[in-house]
Image (tube, rainbow, N blue to C red):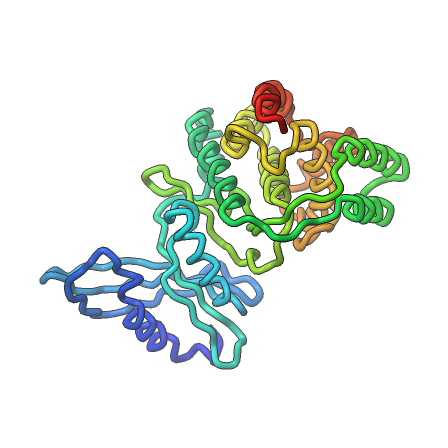
Amino acid sequence: MGPELSDFPSVVRDLVLGNKARIFPDIHGSIDILDVELGRPRFIRDDRYHCRVTVHYRSDGSTKSMRMWLKFRPQLHTLLPILDAYHERLSGQVFPKTYFAWCAPNENTAVLATAYVRGATLRSRLLTLAALRQTFRLFPIFRSNGTKMRRFHDAFAGAESIEVAPLVDSTADLIRETAYFATSEKASVRAHLERYAHILAVRTLPTVQVHNDWILRNIMVAADGVDYVIDCDSMRAQTNLRWLDVAYFLLNLDSQLKWSPLVTAEMLADLGREFWRGYAGEFLPDKLTPEQVIAILYILRLRCLLGGTTRPAYFKVMGGRFDHRVLPSLKESVVTGRAVLSDLWQYDMTEMRPIMEVRGA
């Protein structure tokens, strides 16, 4: 904790006192704050870290305590009104409730306080249940999470759009400039890009608020099985295509094959299918056909891998101890023209086509 935060324990106490109505909305009597206990910094990386806060209070003659989660990062306080709007629109079903935000006087850091979710990340749950060969127990959670991503994207209509032709052209530039593909591989990927651009065949696609980091480690599964999306830092970026969140999530899911043979391709295909069922719902967004969805997901998969998004190139950041085990498969997926490693889309295309025809999309 930097010198500018040396008096933060008193700051956070004042913040708790000033936001009692937000923190304790269901308590209508008097609330006395007895103590605010600040935990040690955790998950320290560059200019960001987390810590837990325990608030001890008295209400109706009983002494109780509650936890909340603080994240420190510059400009993070700007997320408070955004998350408040989504909490109201989505009835608090997607993100943990936000309590308050604060920015240091020198603006070197900011704080966002949210509800503390007791549970484990979806990635941890996947690895645990994969060892037991019981990943089917995650089907409801993956479907729920797909539904929540769809509700998040649909919550507020976007007023802008992105032209597809420049998007395809800049993706072709990424292919030409990358060192991750051999010359013959570049030719194959360019051919698939052109084919999918022809299939997509739309001039523009609408933008919405995107999360930009909707991946397994940023999904908390509470003890009661409810899933919440955390680490919303990247929501500060400008609006983008909804399909970017979908593509990035599926790419992250495919990447779990690095834990093979603990995690199998069949497991991931089944889980991806459940997520897709939740997201697709009764009709596809943006009036796209299933074939067009595959096309835009392929284009965005390329951009995620090569650095055409607000995030670093996936090929570049996959430098972990086991990441090298899955990189050839991720590379082969785009070289062979696949939007995901598994064939889960074929099932959903067949399932969705009658629905699309009925709706005239």
| Residue 9 against residue 176 in the figure, above or below | below
| Residue 333 against residue 1 in the figure, above or below | above
**Numbered circles on residues, count:** 0
| Position in image of residue 227 (x %, y %) | 41, 41
| Position in image of residue 327 (x %, y %) | 70, 38
Residue 69: name its quadrant: bottom left
| Residue 253 against residue 21 in the figure, above or below | above
Give the side of residue 208 with respect to residue 84, left or right.
Answer: right
Which residue is depicted at the point 48% across and 42% down? 151
Residue reaching furthest to the left: 61
- Which is nearer the eye, 300 or 287? 287
| Residue 131 against residue 43 in the figure, above or below | above
- Which is nearer the eye, 108 or 319? 108
| Position in image of residue 258 (x %, y %) | 62, 36
Give the side of residue 214 with respect to residue 66, left or right.
Answer: right
- Which quarter of the figure is the C terminus placed in? top right
Which residue is depicted at the point 77% across and 47% down? 167
**Can residue 255 be seen from the camera position used here?**
no
**Can residue 356 be seen from the camera position used here?**
yes
Which residue is depicted at the point 36% across and 55% down? 115
| Position in image of residue 317 (x %, y %) | 67, 50
- Which is nearer the eye, 142 or 351? 351
